[in-house]
């Protein structure tokens, strides 16, 4: 491999993916600019049944998820789809909304079917609420707010489609989560009309109280945790390592896509060259034209393969890369809760006044810590299982598609060979064995 | 008969008497150092030519073959001799002097072992092509090239072909206009141009595509590394990841063989790229002989015209002599008589020359066209074979891909 160097080591300076800082539950982003300007385009999914249409995005992984759920004790009783992006133009801004369809048999829902429209901002809000309510549970990441490097047109069809799929996955992860799926905020998100949602959002804990929480959290973070249990340290080490690996895989895959695209560019010139040649020939004209056709067909298959990687493997790897930020934040929050408990323990030991209130506070802090630890432990197990399923099926899917790609190309060349053999035998020419 | 590598069975079916007599191969290549013509040290490669009588092999005795060493420059000398001596033959080309149309991994260095090996094969191919050519195979110089190590060079120079070589080169590069070329040769020349252009383009495009394909495969090797590292931190996923990683390494490694095979295909195309040159040379030679005929005919016509003018006293063509005689007075009847006599002789000679050149032309057209037809058939057959072997290569590559990814899929499903 002389002279061929692939740099896939993780180094932030040269990252091809800009992962934004995690929007932790500590500060809610109130930026109105989350949604993007778009060209007015109705990109309705083709199939009439929106439910089925979005299932087509990553059938293998979807099927595997359902399998997993079927094996679980509960059968899935809520189905959520995200589709039908539409752009909205108002006096002050232009943004996209997505249709969110919910079908459920759960009793806490007033009806069995709901259809609402939501914008990215709303998803962000939901995520924030869930993180606030459950600081040590793992919320699936949202697609990034801003455009990733490499986009030529800022808000083109591909970007919207990629985002739509990610939002779809996000909601489904929430729906499958034993605790999140029964969240009131989630229910409101799925069912409330746009106006209702806006007013509900305003009802939440005020800005100031949220700021108060933030200050406390920062104070605890500064203090640091003293006696972190070993298992959480191990978790942190794992997350570090995993983060590096998944980020590498993301990069490697993107590099493969780039190389494939460049290969495709060159290959696209081969077919026409054979075709040009055939124009100067007599006996050879047929076989040359056939070869040109074969090369062109292989080009199409290669294009398909590139698209597959982009649409299926890369988004999944990317999401799990974003997951690691979530995991780090979760571990940090757990640490803060423990730090808070440790601080209160210390305070009780040293202070003489207000001992009763302080003991009360300490008990609450202890409970919070115990709850946080248990929640994290069980959600960690759930997350790992999910991760394994998702990544396994993504890689299995990729391998399958690659097999498919080669099988199609094989068929193309075998049919050429066959036609040449029948020709040759017909003309009584040389034997090929 | 022998299976002549890429040449297939066809050549031996139409076997020449030479091939019926002996087996020819270029068995080895070796590096030598020595002093060159200007007494400086140089390193060069020599190739071992082995010849073996056909009967001996079939008798099962299998004696040691006769062999001798030759350098590339001696092959060039042989070819130049053949070009000059058989101008009506499409003389087989030599493998390229320097590596061209290389993609990045392939070395452009003449001393590179892969290049030397491909050249060895190309030289063997050249010898077999010449040995199976109906006219070239019976050439004595060719025979002694194969059998006489010492003094061969001197023998070649003794033929005096060098002088002809220089004038041939000059003529081929000269520009002249032919009034009535044989249409078929004009078309063939045009075809030769097109063939050269399109094969060059194909080789360029193919080399770039090979470069890219190499990149695609090699990047997959990184999967192998990362999977292996990742498997170290996982419990249940570890085994599946680790074994999948091995398959990714295998996938990355497989491209080396794939591209080596494709290089063989590129060599087959290159041979015909260079053949196009040989074809064009024959067409040019036709133009030359045709031109010389036309010149001789033109000269004859003008001489005849001069005679007519002199005989009838009318001046239709301008001639300096005519003008000077006008200026300095008419010539005497004796002078006119002398001139007429000279012209008559010249015309006689001219007519002989035209007859000669005409015969040459006809002879050339006949022989050359026979060889061109032979070449056409050979080209159609060989290139079709090449396309088929290309398809077979692609099929093999796809099968390898299917196998690797199926294996990987199995490993992934155990993750």
Image (cartoon, rainbow, N blue to C red):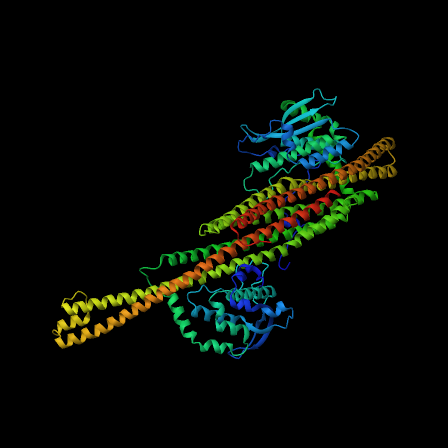
Q: Residue A296 location in percent, x, y?
A: 53, 45
Q: Which of the image's four quarters has the N terminus of chain A?
A: bottom right
Q: Quadrant of the C terminus of chain A?
A: bottom right
Instruction: Tell how many labels.
Output: 0
Would you identify the image quadrant in which residue A209 lies?
Answer: top right
Percent from the top left, x then y, of residue B19?
54, 67
Q: Is residue B158 above or below residue A232?
A: below
The one of B372 and A70 positioned closer to us in this rendering = B372
Residue closest to the far top: A110
Q: Is residue A342 above or below residue B169?
A: above
Q: Is residue B389 left or right of residue B349?
A: right
Task: Looking at this view, name the residue that lies furthest to the front.
Answer: B59
Name the residue at 58% across, 37% down.
Answer: A158
From the viewer's perspective, is residue B130 above or below residue A306? below
Instruction: Compare residues A307 and B132 and report the one nearer the observer.
Output: B132
Q: Is residue A9 visible?
A: no
Kindly indicate the quadrant of the structure image that contains residue A354. Answer: top right
In this orientation, does residue B18 appear?
yes
Q: Depth check: give the residue in front, B287 or A358.
A: B287
Report which quarter residue B305 is drawn in: bottom left
Relative image position of residue A342 (x, y in whole percent): 83, 39
Question: Which residue is drawn at the image coordinates 46% and 56% (left, top)?
Answer: B195
Residue B315 place in picture, x, y as percent: 15, 66
């Amino acid at each position: 491999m002389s002279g061929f160097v692939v740099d896939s080591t993780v180094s932030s300076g040269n990252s091809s993916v800009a992962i934004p800082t995690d929007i932790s539950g500590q500060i809610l982003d109130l930026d109105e600019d989350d949604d993007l300007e778009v060209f007015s385009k109705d990109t309705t999914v083709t199939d009439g049944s929106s439910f089925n249409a979005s299932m087509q995005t990553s059938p293998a992984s979807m099927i595997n998820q359902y399998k997993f759920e079927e094996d679980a004790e509960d059968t899935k009783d809520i189905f959520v789809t995200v589709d039908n992006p539409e752009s909205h133009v108002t006096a002050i801004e232009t943004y996209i909304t997505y249709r969110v369809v919910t079908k459920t048999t759960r009793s806490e829902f007033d009806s069995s079917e709901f259809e609402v429209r939501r914008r990215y901002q709303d998803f962000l809000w939901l995520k924030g609420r869930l993180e606030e309510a459950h600081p040590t549970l793992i919320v699936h990441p949202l697609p990034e707010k801003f455009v990733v490097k490499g986009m030529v047109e800022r808000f083109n069809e591909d970007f919207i489609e990629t985002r739509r799929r990610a939002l779809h996955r996000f909601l489904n992860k929430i729906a499958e989560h034993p605790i999140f799926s029964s969240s009131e905020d989630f229910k409101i998100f799925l069912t409330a009309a746009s106006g209702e949602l806006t007013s509900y959002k305003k009802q939440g804990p005020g800005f100031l109280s949220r700021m108060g929480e933030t200050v406390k959290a920062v104070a605890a973070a500064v203090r640091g945790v003293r006696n972190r249990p070993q298992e959480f340290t191990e978790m942190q080490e794992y997350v570090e390592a995993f983060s590096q690996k998944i980020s590498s895989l993301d990069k490697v895959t993107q590099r493969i896509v780039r190389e494939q695209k460049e290969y495709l560019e060159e290959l696209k010139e081969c077919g026409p060259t054979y075709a040009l040649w055939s124009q100067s020939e007599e006996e050879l004209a047929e076989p040359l034209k056939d070869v040109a056709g074969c090369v062109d067909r292989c080009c199409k298959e290669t294009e398909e393969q590139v698209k597959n990687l982009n649409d299926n493997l890369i988004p999944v790897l990317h999401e799990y890369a974003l997951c690691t930020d979530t995991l780090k934040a979760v571990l940090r929050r757990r640490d803060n809760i423990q730090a808070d408990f440790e601080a209160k323990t210390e305070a009780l030991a040293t202070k003489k006044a207000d001992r009763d209130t302080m003991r009360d506070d300490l008990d609450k802090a202890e409970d919070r810590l115990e709850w946080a630890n248990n929640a994290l432990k069980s959600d960690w197990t759930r997350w790992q299982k999910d991760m394994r399923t998702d990544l396994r099926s993504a890689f299995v899917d990729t391998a399958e598609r690659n097999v498919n790609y080669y099988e199609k190309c094989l068929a193309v060349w075998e049919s050429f060979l066959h036609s040449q053999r029948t020709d040759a035998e017909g003309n009584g020419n040389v034997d090929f064995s | 008969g022998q299976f002549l590598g890429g040449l297939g069975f066809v050549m031996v079916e139409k076997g020449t008497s030479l091939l019926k007599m002996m087996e020819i191969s270029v068995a080895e290549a070796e590096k030598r150092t020595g002093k060159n013509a200007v007494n400086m040290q140089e390193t060069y490669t020599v190739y071992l030519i082995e010849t073996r009588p056909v009967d001996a092999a079939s008798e099962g005795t299998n004696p040691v073959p006769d062999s001798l060493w030759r350098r590339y420059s001696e092959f060039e000398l042989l070819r130049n001799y053949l070009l000059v001596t058989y101008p009506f033959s499409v003389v087989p080309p030599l493998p390229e002097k320097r590596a061209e149309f290389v993609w990045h991994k392939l070395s452009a260095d003449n001393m590179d072992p892969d290049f030397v090996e491909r050249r060895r094969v190309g030289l063997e191919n050249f010898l077999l092509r010449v040995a199976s050519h109906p006219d070239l195979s019976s050439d004595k110089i060719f025979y002694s090239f194969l059998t006489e190590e010492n003094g061969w060079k001197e023998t070649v120079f003794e033929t005096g072909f060098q002088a002809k070589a220089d004038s041939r080169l000059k003529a081929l590069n000269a520009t002249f206009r032919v009034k009535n070329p044989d249409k078929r040769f004009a078309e063939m020349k045009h075809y030769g141009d097109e063939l050269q252009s399109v094969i060059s383009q194909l080789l360029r495009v193919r080399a770039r595509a090979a470069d890219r394909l190499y990149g695609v495969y090699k990047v997959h090797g990184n999967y192998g590394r990362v999977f292996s590292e990742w498997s170290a931190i996982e419990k249940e996923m570890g085994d599946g990841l680790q074994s999948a990683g091995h398959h990714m390494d295998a996938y990355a490694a497989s491209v080396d063989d794939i591209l080596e095979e494709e290089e063989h295909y590129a060599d087959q195309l290159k041979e015909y790229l260079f053949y196009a040159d040989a074809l064009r040379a024959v067409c040019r030679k036709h133009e030359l002989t045709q031109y010389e005929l036309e010149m001789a005919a033109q000269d004859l016509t003008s001489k005849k015209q001069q005679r007519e003018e002199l005989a009838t006293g009318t001046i239709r063509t301008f001639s300096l002599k005519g003008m000077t005689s006008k200026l300095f007075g008419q010539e005497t009847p004796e002078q006119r008589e002398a001139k007429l006599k000279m012209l008559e002789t010249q015309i006689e000679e001219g007519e002989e020359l035209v007859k000669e050149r005409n015969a040459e032309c006809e002879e050339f057209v006949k022989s050359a066209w026979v060889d061109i037809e032979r070449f056409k058939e050979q080209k159609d057959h060989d290139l079709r074979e090449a396309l088929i072997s290309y398809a077979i290569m692609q099929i093999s590559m796809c099968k390898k891909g299917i196998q690797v990814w199926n294996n990987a899929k199995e490993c992934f499903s155990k993750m």
